[in-house]
Image (tube, rainbow, N blue to C red):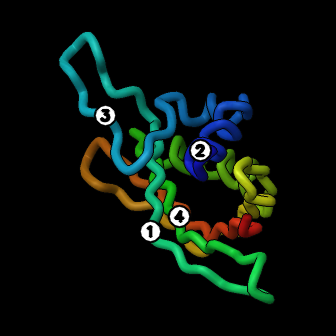
Amino acid sequence: MTLFEAIRTWWLADSTLSAAVAGGLYLSQAPPKLGLDRPIIMPYAVMVDLGNSFEFSSGTPYIDSHAVQFSIFSTTQAEGETARAALRSRFDAEKITLDGGFDSVMMMLPEAEETTREDDNIWHTRVDYQIQVHRVLL
């Protein structure tokens, strides 16, 4: 299971978060609107892996640190802030188990948060996390 798959599984398991971000969670970019029969449901979130680094300890176990950004796009500021609160209540300092020799994923406290108005109709609420994947080399 990849980091995104694990996060998506947790995301979908939380009814409050799923309700607050009705448009879903996407990796890197949301799919384009395909006409009137497929409108973009707001709010929606996009997760971007901003990069990672490795930290070794005693040669075998190591930590893979990821900087991850969740961007929530909404039609009102309040809608984005509600979604951010739901995201933080689900992910702050949480532990997720991965398979394939990875011990766990620690969802650390957010490093940054920001809400900005992109245009007259879109608000962008951003939460950056530092995520640590504790691995065991096989």
Q: Nearer the observer, disc 3 or disc 2? A: 3
Distance between the Cα atoms at labels 4 and 1?
Answer: 5 Å
Q: Are marks 4 and 3 in contact (CB under 8 Å)?
A: no
At 52% from the left edge and 41% from the top edge, which residue is drawn? 79
Image quadrant occupied by the N terminus: top right
Element at badge 1?
Answer: strand
On the rendered structure, is 40 left or right of 25? left
Q: Is residue 88 shown to the viewer in this render?
A: yes
Q: List the residue tagged with mark 1.
A: 50
Distance between the Cα atoms at labels 2 and 4?
Answer: 17 Å
Element at badge 4?
Answer: strand
Q: Position of residue 71 (x, y in %)?
A: 45, 54
Q: Rate crowding at label 4 as few (under 14), some (14 to 19) or many (20 or more) other CA atoms within 10 Å.
A: some
Q: Give the amino acid at mark 2.
A: Ala
On the rendered structure, is 55 left or right of 124? right
Element at badge 2?
Answer: helix
Distance between the Cα atoms at labels 4 and 3?
Answer: 19 Å
Q: Give the amino acid at mark 1.
A: Leu
On the rendered structure, is 73 left or right of 65? left
At 22% from the left edge and 14% from the top edge, which residue is drawn? 36
Distance between the Cα atoms at labels 1 and 3?
Answer: 20 Å
Marker disc for residue 83: 2
Q: List the residue tagged with mark 3.
A: 31
